[in-house]
Amino acid sequence: MSLQTFNWLILCWALLAVALVPVQLWLTPGYGRHASGKWGPGIDNRLGWIVMEIVSPVALLAPFAAGGAVSAPVAVFLGLWLAHYLQRSVIYPLTMRTRGKKIPLVIVASAILFNTANGWANGYYLAQGWGGYGGQWLADPRFWIGLAVFALGATINIRADRRLVALRDHGEPQTYVIPKGGLFRWVSCPNHLGEIVEWTGFAIACWNLPALAFAVWTAANLAPRAIAHHRWYRQTFPDYPSERKALIPFLL
Ligand SMILES: NC(=O)c1ccc[n+]([C@@H]2O[C@H](COP(=O)([O-])OP(=O)(O)OC[C@H]3O[C@@H](n4cnc5c(N)ncnc54)[C@H](OP(=O)(O)O)[C@@H]3O)[C@@H](O)[C@H]2O)c1
């Protein structure tokens, strides 16, 4: 495939994410607190998370099976992706407290499609050597700014997810309580905020179209989800902190 064809495909892929935002605002994917019978049959929640997330690093690395060159910056990009998905597809599902809960197969299938497309697009671009990431890229400010933003986002995401999971220390899997402390003082979903910041940092560090498309998809998925979570908190808890926003402190 030529770079031009690839870029057109990725542009259409990113535009699809934007086009689906109104749909995601109207129809919140039915897992976690938004689960309902109308999403069809499901599988064990933990298993579903492992299956749907593990495909991403596999799809990322698949294009390298044909023998793509791995320069130092490309090794860093792959390392960041693999570290994130070690957390997302192994550590996070193994620590979650959702015993007995199911995730709909249709959600798992759509996440597999999403993760395969984004993993493959990023891996293919890097394996083709299109970015021209030689040693000089290590001296580019975009690389270091992107790494710093990625690290900040990952830290926010992991800390917030851990805090949420810990809320069920002494509770049943169906129990929800108001999260407190850390960035929860300002927003309902710092885990979603952190994930968006993280992939924005990755896109800055790579400065290429497939990484940007993944950041756009992440924001298009998680901003509507954070808004739905926030609305749910306010409807469920009459004493929910009124000054707290959904996703971005003081703004949204
Ligand atoms: N890149 C992407 O496009 C994308 C898309 C989706 C998710 N993600 C990431 O995947 C992770 C999980 O996403 P999510 O939307 O499922 O997160 P979430 O709804 O905030 O849930 C995170 C975990 O904490 C539990 N939990 C949440 N709020 C709770 C509360 N108030 N009291 C007790 N337990 C609570 C949830 O249990 P329940 O499951 O039982 O609610 C779940 O196990 C996040 O880090 C997110 O950024 C990324």
Image (cartoon, rainbow, N blue to C red):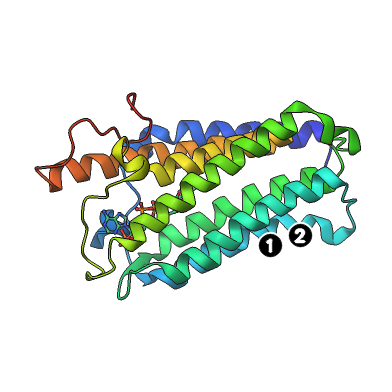
Reply above or below: 171 against 192: below
Residue most extreme to the left: 238
Please name whichever residue, 9 or 71, is drawn nearer the observer in this view of the structure. 71
Q: Is residue 2 above or below residue 251?
A: below
Screen quadrant of the C terminus = top left
Q: Residue furthest front?
A: 181
Between 250 and 230, the one nearer to me in the picture: 250
For image coordinates 26% across by 40% down, the residue present is: 230
Residue 130 in view (yes/no): yes
Give how far apart the Cα atoms at labels 1 and 2 are: 6 Å
Q: Where in the figure is residue 153, as x and y percent of width and height?
A: 53, 41
- In the rendered structure, the answer to whether residue 104 lies left or right of residue 168 reads right
Q: Which numbered tag is attached to residue 174?
A: none
Which three-letter amino acid code belongs to the residue tagged 2? Ala
Residue for point 87% across, 59% down: 66
SS for dot 2: helix
Instruction: Answer with left or right where residue 38 lies relative to residue 111.
Output: left
Instruction: From the top left corner, tell me how far across and down residue 3 is, in percent.
Output: 82, 34
Q: Is residue 181 left or right of residue 223?
A: left
Q: Say few, some or many: other residues with alpha carbon within 10 Å of mark 1 (under 14 / 14 to 19 / 20 or more).
A: some
Quarter of the rendered structure image containing ligand 1: bottom left
Whether label 1 touches label 2, CB < 8 Å: yes
The residue wearing badge 2 is: 62
Q: Describe the element under mark 1 as helix, strand or loop.
A: helix
Instruction: Identify the residue under disc 1.
Output: 58
